[in-house]
Amino acid sequence: MEEIKKATRESYGETLLELGKENENIVVLDADLSSATKTSLFAKEFPDRFINVGIAEQNMMGIAAGLSTFGKVPFASTFAVFAAGRAYEQIRNSIAYPKLNVKICATHAGITVGEDGATHQMIEDIGLMRGLPNMTVMSTSDDVQTKWAVREIAKINGPVYLRLCRMKTPVIYNEKDSEKFEIGKGIQIGKGTEASIIATGDTVAEAIKAKEILKGHGINVRVIDIHTIKPIDRELIVKCAKETKRIITVEDHSVINGLGAAVSDALSEEYPVKVEKMGIPDVFGRSGKAEELMRYFKIDSMAIVNKFM
Amino acid sequence: MKITNIEALERIAKEVRRGIIEEVYNAGSGHPGGSLSCADILTVLYFNQMNIDEKKTNDPNRDRLVLSKGHASPALYSVLARKGYFDKELLKTFRKIGSNLQGHPDMNKVPGVDMTTGSLGQGISTAVGMAIASKMNQAGCKVFCILGDGEIEEGQVWEACTTASKYELDNLCVIVDNNNLQIDGKIEEVGGMNNLTEKFISFGFNVLNINGHDISSIVDAITTAKQTKGKPTAIIAKTIKGKGVSFMENKAEWHGKAPKEEEYKLAMKELEA
């Protein structure tokens, strides 16, 4: 069967358009990247509810905050490096601290941005955002989950950071699966006991691929898809630590302060075990094709398989 | 209830200044200089100009005030207390543990505070967002934003001005508290921000220059701003840092320190009705 691939930013843009039709309070902001973040779909249909601030991300976050105080539900989008990075303090002081209902949907996260290189490859955003009180942090793995998440976060009253990717990734779930999704609850795929491969965003599909390859070698692992980094599903993580021999985290993010750190935090307090963190070591990214970079930084399926060989 | 008598407004402004000194003295810290410089502006806004009701703090159609220079919180709190948003006794708890009167204004803790501010340059963007939302909702409410003249050294301020002009936000009025001092000294020597009138005009604003301590000038300027169509207004209010307390006037050192007991008594005596 041919693998269907789609970038989560595409799923985001399509869902925003649908939400726009259903809820007139949805407003969308962008900073001159609407064709890349896919907010252009919404902009075309609802020009009066679309605010393009130009290349001014700090201003965009403040405007989103102001809009929310009037009952609007602002979705503010730009690349992750400019959202969580450049506008960090605006998010902190104008959105997170006053607990305003702003949805920050950041695309082009991680090294899979590819050819643009290190300046545009945001590998610290999970750390920055999960450190903020009041902030819900999500990182979705495929088309179905992203569509579900965009709808869910519109229902929450409070700030959310949703991490999305540029590159096309395999569609993992079918629509019926999303009925069981819940913010703050991880998804367990398989029941293998050799290891729990805990992944988020674009590494979930890699983990699933690795799981299938390992199965062929008689090694049964399970995959845990953590779409909500904060609040993290501590219960599921502890359960997996108890049921499986190894805990391995894989993320398209720095090994510092990301998914691996969040998993380690959860385990160290309740059920301390060794956590093997796969991610970008303490270095900046570099140019290359997304797939090449995943291989280079050892966050692809082969790197996961090699952990067992 | 709107107060239109100029002398009555001047009396209130003096009370507001007494409140500022009491707050900062009791707290043992805070920002008296920049609070005293915008006391007249805030008094006119809350007692004469803004369409607000202290009993309906969540009225969606009320006018909004964003104190972008959030360190002038003593002035805002003093005005809000006198307007009846909360008990004046609370002013004594300013900056103290357990108090809702935080060092910088928190919209979730203090009735009447429309936006959490304190990090300079950020408030004006939130005011722009409010003004856009007001137009979207056809709420007809006005949004006022008080900026410090040191604060406008932040680049975000000019990003916000660009958007305000793009969306022709004639329901937005920013007021620059132009006291010409920032923490490290004179504006022209520290950050070098200059030519405010030309800058705001070139950013698409209607600009009014006034004496920021002359109550009737403030009333007139804000009235003009409200009637201006098609563009936002910037009122550049020439002010004196520490205004009303002789030994604090025009002294950068009074940006962020509290008076000692003797100084407090002297200041309160100068501010007697």
Image: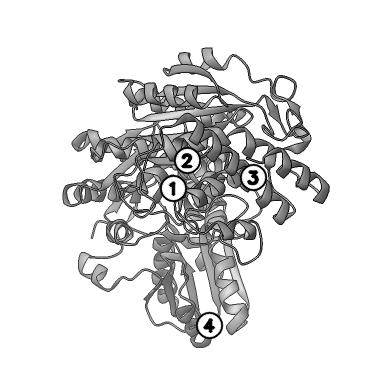
Q: Which mark is nearer the camera, 3 or 4? A: 3
Amino acid marked by disc 1? Asp
**In which quadrant of the rendered image does the C terminus of chain B lie?**
top right
Q: Judge if badges 3 and 4 mark residues of a common chain.
A: no
Q: Which mark is nearer the camera, 2 or 4? A: 2
Measure the C-alpha gap from mark 2 to mark 4.
Answer: 49 Å
Q: Which mark is nearer the camera, 2 or 3? A: 3
Amino acid marked by disc 2? Val
The answer to whether B51 is drawn above or below residue A68 in the figure is above
Position in image of residue A52 (x %, y %)? 35, 32
Position in image of residue B196 (x %, y %)? 56, 17
- Circle 2 Cα neighbour tier, 10 Å, few/some/many (<14 / 14–19 / ≥20): many
Give the residue number, with chain letter if any, for mark 2: B66
Q: Which chain's residue wears label 2? A: B
Give the residue number, with chain letter if any, for mark 4: A241
- Circle 3 Cα neighbour tier, 10 Å, few/some/many (<14 / 14–19 / ≥20): many
Question: Which element carries disc 2, helix, strand or loop?
Answer: strand
Asked whether the beta carbons under mark 3 and mark 4 sit within 8 Å of each other, the answer is no
- Circle 4 Cα neighbour tier, 10 Å, few/some/many (<14 / 14–19 / ≥20): many
**In which quadrant of the rendered image does the N terminus of chain B lie?**
top left
First in sequence: mark 2 or mark 3?
Answer: 3
Residue at x-position 68% and y-position 31%: B241
Give the residue number, with chain letter if any, for mark 3: B18
Q: Judge if badges 3 and 1 mark residues of a common chain.
A: yes
Give the residue number, with chain letter if any, for mark 1: B114
Q: Which chain's residue wears label 3? A: B
Q: Is residue A55 visible?
A: no
Amino acid marked by disc 3? Arg
Question: Which element carries disc 4, helix, strand or loop?
Answer: helix
